[in-house]
Image: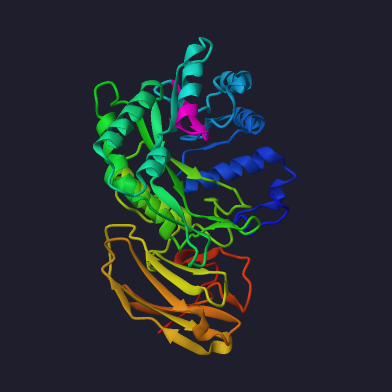
């Protein structure tokens, strides 16, 4: 992990180190389930995966609703098949291995759609492999590169249909990429993640049409979900944009009514792609996932355990660091979480060191019935004399007015920035929310 971290787990318990890895792993499963997720998969780390299955099997009672999905390395050559086979056969003996209608649910990652077809055919040809459902990549990236965000010809669409159908003959399901990564030379990041117009206008409708054909209706449809990619050590950074990147992925996949979602990644600390609760992010991702999972599962929205309903379910997000020339970005996200919606009014203020006033944003209102994000961008040159910028927030909710302070500051530098992470502060999770009634 390059011996450094740009964030750290929120619920690290040093007392578990002496108890052994099993106690720490079970604690992590509890955190995972609190986020509304159903299981882990170890990407090409077969010894780790099998050791975790042994720890689980040593428990007296099964952990309800939790399982470990087998992840196969699609980027590896087929001459590695015997080691993959051994992994599958060993894991198939565990009650914790993910299954669907009695069949092993396998996910294959990397290498492209053609590699996934070859792996599926190889697995299918081996009589010792138990019944399985293999979820692989749909060749969306190939289609996108060929169409290049333009209007595809009828011939191109027909080729796409044929490729999807060919893959569906051997795969049990598909994972979709519903966003595109593009160079952003003028922005504060080297790369941006944007909704792929090809996906929305052509790829998804074409895929759904093919999967609606006789013989294909039982194929699984899933999606890859990311919240960003921040790796200043390598210089590769895809912006979080507050919470907009994660919400963008989820908004794009909602119309497909997916069967399975793969989240990149649970605890990849050095690349900051983690969904695991951390000091900088808190339980922000868990709150957003809970909202979208309720939509996907057609279940009523509800507050998280131990939430105080008198406090609005608002998340304040801002960058931890800026160099002058980058825009200062502040996001206020409101998430509904029940039937008893109430009007919320809020206004954010920016201050410098010593409480110097920098500026105030407009008073925002919402009826509390739907998700809404207020996003502000300010040229950092407008407060070049400051060393740091602090956020204060006024809220008027259920007849109670409060002022909130104590949010993470954004440090300013004239020349350099190595920290591209956001800090997210859910009002309901601030350990000592410094607020006063007004």
In the image, 277: left or right of 164? right
Residue drawn at the location 44% of the way across and 30% of the way down = 135
Outermost residue toward the top in this view: 127
Place residue 428 in its image quadrant.
bottom left
Q: Is residue 173 magenta?
A: no
Image quadrant holding the C terminus, namely bottom left
Looking at the picture, the colour scheme in use is rainbow
In the image, 108: left or right of 365? right
State whether residue 92 appears in this view.
yes
**Highlighted range, magenta:** 103-116
In this rendered view, identify the residue nearer to me: 201 or 155. 155
Residue drawn at the location 28% of the way across and 42% of the way down = 152
Q: Is residue 153 above or below residue 228?
A: above
Residue drawn at the location 58% of the way across and 36% of the way down = 43
Q: Position of residue 228 (x, y in %)?
A: 50, 55
In this rendered view, identify the residue nearer to me: 339 or 364. 364
């Amino acid at each position: 992990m390059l011996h450094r971290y740009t964030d750290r787990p929120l619920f690290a318990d040093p007392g578990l180190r002496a108890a052994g890895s099993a106690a720490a792993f079970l604690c992590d499963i509890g955190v995972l389930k609190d986020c509304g997720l159903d299981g882990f998969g170890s990407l090409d780390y077969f010894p780790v995966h099998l050791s975790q299955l042994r720890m689980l099997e040593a428990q007296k009672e099964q952990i309800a609703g939790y399982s470990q999905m087998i992840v196969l390395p699609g980027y590896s050559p087929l001459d590695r098949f015997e080691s993959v086979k051994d992994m599958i056969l060993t894991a198939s003996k565990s009650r914790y291995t993910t299954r669907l209608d009695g069949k092993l649910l396998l996910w294959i990652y990397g290498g492209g759609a053609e590699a996934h077809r070859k792996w599926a055919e190889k697995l299918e040809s081996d009589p010792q492999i138990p019944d399985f459902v293999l979820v692989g990549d749909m060749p969306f990236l190939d289609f996108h590169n060929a169409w290049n965000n333009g209007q595809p010809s009828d011939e191109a669409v027909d080729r796409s249909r044929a490729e999807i159908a060919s893959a569906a003959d051997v795969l049990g399901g598909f994972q979709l990429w519903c966003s595109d990564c593009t160079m952003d030379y003028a922005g504060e990041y080297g790369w941006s993640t944007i909704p792929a117009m090809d996906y929305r206008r052509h790829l998804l409708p074409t895929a759904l049409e093919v999967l609606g054909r006789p013989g294909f209706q039982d194929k699984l449809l899933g999606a890859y979900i990311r919240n960003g990619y921040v790796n200043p050590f390598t210089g590769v950074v895809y912006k979080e944009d507050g919470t907009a990147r994660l919400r963008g992925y989820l908004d794009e996949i909602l119309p497909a009514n997916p069967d399975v979602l793969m989240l990149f990644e649970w605890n990849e600390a050095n690349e900051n792609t983690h969904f695991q609760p951390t000091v900088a992010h808190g339980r922000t991702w868990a709150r957003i996932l809970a909202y979208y999972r309720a939509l996907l599962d057609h279940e009523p929205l509800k507050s998280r355990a131990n939430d105080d309903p008198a406090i609005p379910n608002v998340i304040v997000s801002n960058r931890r660091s800026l160099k002058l020339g980058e825009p200062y970005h502040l996001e206020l996200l409101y998430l509904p979480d029940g039937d008893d919606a109430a009007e919320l009014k809020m206004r954010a203020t920016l201050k410098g060191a010593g409480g110097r006033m920098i500026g105030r944003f407009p008073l925002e209102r919402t009826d509390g019935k739907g998700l809404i994000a207020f996003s502000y961008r300010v040229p950092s040159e407008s407060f070049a004399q400051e060393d740091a910028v602090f956020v204060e927030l006024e809220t008027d909710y259920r007849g109670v007015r409060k002022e909130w302070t104590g949010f993470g500051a954004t440090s300013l530098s004239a020349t350099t920035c190595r920290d591209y992470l956001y800090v997210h502060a859910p009002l309901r999770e601030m350990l000592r929310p410094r607020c006063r009634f007004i």
